[in-house]
Image: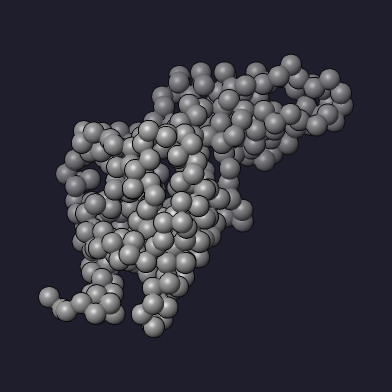
Amino acid sequence: MERVISGIRPTGNLHLGNYFGAVKSFVKMQDEYDCMFFIADWHSLTTHPTPEDIKKSVKTILSEYLACGIDPEKAPIYVQSDVKQVLELYLYLNMNAYLGELERVTSFKEKVRKQPDNVNAGLLTYPCLMAADILVHKADKVPVGKDQEQNMEMARLFARRFNRIYGVEYFKEPASFHFADKAVKVPGLDGTGKMGKSEGNCLYLCDDEKTVTKKIMRAVTDQGPTQLNQEKPEVIQNLFTLCELLCGKEAADYYNDLYNNMQIRYGDMKKQMAADANALLAPIRERILAYSSDDALLDRIMRQGAEKAAARAEKTIEEVREIIGFRKI
């Protein structure tokens, strides 16, 4: 069975973009692959969260993962900082990474542009830590979005370079993949780009019924089409994309026909979207509350996940140490 690894930074609540773009696929993947999922708290340190924020966010993400249907018996869930072997491999990969190639990574250059006062070494070597997360488990596949594809190429580069330096064929090159036929891009409620926390255009899995309805009813639209079969502006096409995700293709086609015939009433469309969104999120919300209130269960899941992940990672580190030439302890 092929091995899959994926992580998420604990930077707040999961939203519909996370759900449709990743977590929904994770639930299916756990029955078909040897999966492990982790909460990437080391990665979050580049933004200097408080200790309280880290603890709260880890608990939040774990509760929401479980509420969405990830079964830790099928796919262990662990916290990145509980698996110390990742840091050791991160060190070794850093020794084989070069400043120029790290500075050319698009995500690093984007961070430099957006936050020039916080260009720390962790941002620069982010691809090395991501590669360590993957290679320490010898993962075959990693589900990533387009924005992470360059970092995946760096992980493959580091694997090849390690093998070449030490004259071995040890690390396999992990493949990027999408469990669905194509990557799902979930648009934000502001009609532009994709749904994201920093954009403030999200529907969160924990949003209550009134909040969900209010957000959807305020989604950006226009005055409606002025010609038959008129091409949709980007903000309207994004609304229809979100409609299909929430309501299904049949409903989206129905409203599309109304649009093409200049009969669309966005308010009616939004009401159905809100009703279907709440039908989807209501049971998830209930499970989030149940899991988040059971600290003993969450602690046990994190501990058991860390034990499984550390056992696999320790075997890799022992072999890597021997390849490099370090003595056995």
Q: Is residue 231 left or right of residue 181?
A: right
Q: Is residue 202 left or right of residue 226?
A: left
Vertical position of residue 106 compared to residue 263: above or below: below
Q: x%, y% of residue 64?
A: 35, 40
Q: Is residue 291 visible?
A: no
Q: Residue at x 62, y 28 (%)?
A: 191
In the image shown, does 278 or 205 lie closer to the viewer? 205
Q: Residue at x 42, y 34 (%)?
A: 115
Q: Is residue 318 left or right of residue 181?
A: left
In the image shown, does 194 or 103 lie closer to the viewer? 103
Residue extending farthest to the front is 100
In the image shown, does 157 or 196 lie closer to the viewer? 157
Vertical position of residue 31 compared to residue 285: above or below: below
In the rendered image, which quarter is residue 49 located in? Answer: top left
Q: Residue at x 20, y 77 (%)?
A: 326
Q: How many marks?
A: 0
Q: x%, y% of residue 51?
A: 20, 36
Q: Is residue 253 visible?
A: yes
In the image shown, does 46 or 272 lie closer to the viewer? 46
Rendered image coloring scheme? one colour
Q: x%, y% of residue 216?
A: 55, 23
Residue extending farthest to the top is 223
Q: Residue at x 43, y 72 (%)?
A: 161
In the rendered image, which quarter is residue 5 located in? Answer: bottom left
Q: x%, y% of residue 39?
A: 32, 48
Q: State which quarter of the image contains the C terminus.
A: bottom left
Residue extending farthest to the right is 228
Vertical position of residue 266 compared to residue 5: above or below: above
